[in-house]
Amino acid sequence: MSPSLEPLAITGMSLKFPGNAVSPESFWKLITEGQMTMRDYPPDRSNIDAFYHPDRDRLDQISTRGANFLNQDISRFDAAFFSINAAEAEAMDPQQRLILETVYHAFENAGMTLSQASWSKTCVYTGSFSHDYTFMQVKDPMALPKFHSTGTGMNMLSNRVSWFFNLTGPSATVDTACYSSLIALDLACKSIWSGDSSMVCPRSLTGGSSINCPRRAWLLVAMRSSDLTPVYRWITSVYCLTRAGHTVLISAAMGMLVARELESWYFALLRMLSITTILLEQ
């Protein structure tokens, strides 16, 4: 028999979900209270009145007026804090900006400092299939920003995290459509178990992202598919799958988890408590 795998523990998390769901507590509150997060396209994203038409067979129009958006202004970003200049920040997909912020808060939630994370063999696996910012930039090839390739490359979702936080484990972005983040989580777990993320306390970062920008190119195609329904008001994908069958959920979201081997985390916690007790006694 093969030896059993060491149980893993989620020791930190951070999220930015639609509505007021910006923490695990507020997300749970949103679910239990059945809050609605769907709303019309914000004016700073798109002039929906210019593109909306209820006829799903029209290729020149969008047949839904809204989706599930983040409440925050996704253009706001402290580029200097992440050692990024203004020109590069402007070319960066909002997903890349938000994931750096989300990882910082995930480490903070896990009780880790930047120096503790730096140069650790921590793996980073992210999942995403949103290319909205790319479509926006390539509309005018003559005006492509200097940092277009790195600013919109999906590989940079994970690679920027590894670079800024000095993480030396495997780093990859996966695209398996709607369950990209689940595959990312599976890869992160296997990375710890295989020793790819081996260190004193094996650790991984995993998460997923999706940001809706004006007029998603794939949305116009999806609305014509016979197995999809034009219902966008469900609160979460879980509710969508269990109650609405093939309903499509158009949502913006960002979430990151910090995971590590349960035993190493447990003994690390005991050591920390022991040191704290000794200091208090002194």
Image (cartoon, helix red, strand yellow):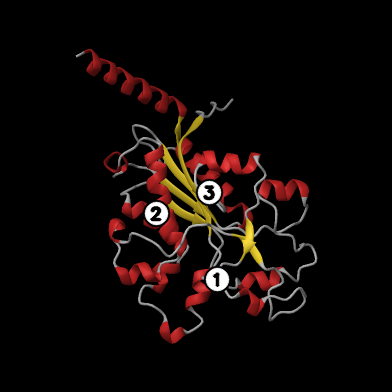
Q: Position of residue 238 (x, y in %)?
A: 68, 46
Q: Nearer the viewer, mark 1 or mark 2?
A: 1
Instruction: Return the residue found at the far bottom.
Output: 142
Q: If you read the primary sequence from the N terminus, does the residue marked by circle 3 or circle 2 appear first?
A: 2
Query: Could you tell me which residue is drawn at 36 percent across and 67 percent down?
Result: 89
Label 1's element?
A: loop
Report the Cα–Cα distance between label 3 and label 2: 17 Å
Q: Nearer the viewer, mark 3 or mark 2?
A: 2
Numbered badge on residue 100: 2
Which quarter of the image is occupied by the C terminus?
top left
Query: Could you tell me which residue is drawn at 32 percent across and 49 percent down?
Result: 165
Dot 1 crowding, Cα within 10 Å, few <14, some 14–19, many 20+? few
Q: Seen in the image, is 218 located left or right of residue 148?
A: right
- Provide the residue designation for mark 3: 184
- Provide the residue designation for mark 1: 43
Report the Cα–Cα distance between label 3 and label 1: 33 Å
Q: If you read the primary sequence from the N terminus, does the residue marked by circle 1 or circle 2 appear first?
A: 1
Query: Could you tell me which residue is drawn at 33 percent across and 20 percent down?
Result: 273
Q: Amino acid at mark 2?
A: Leu
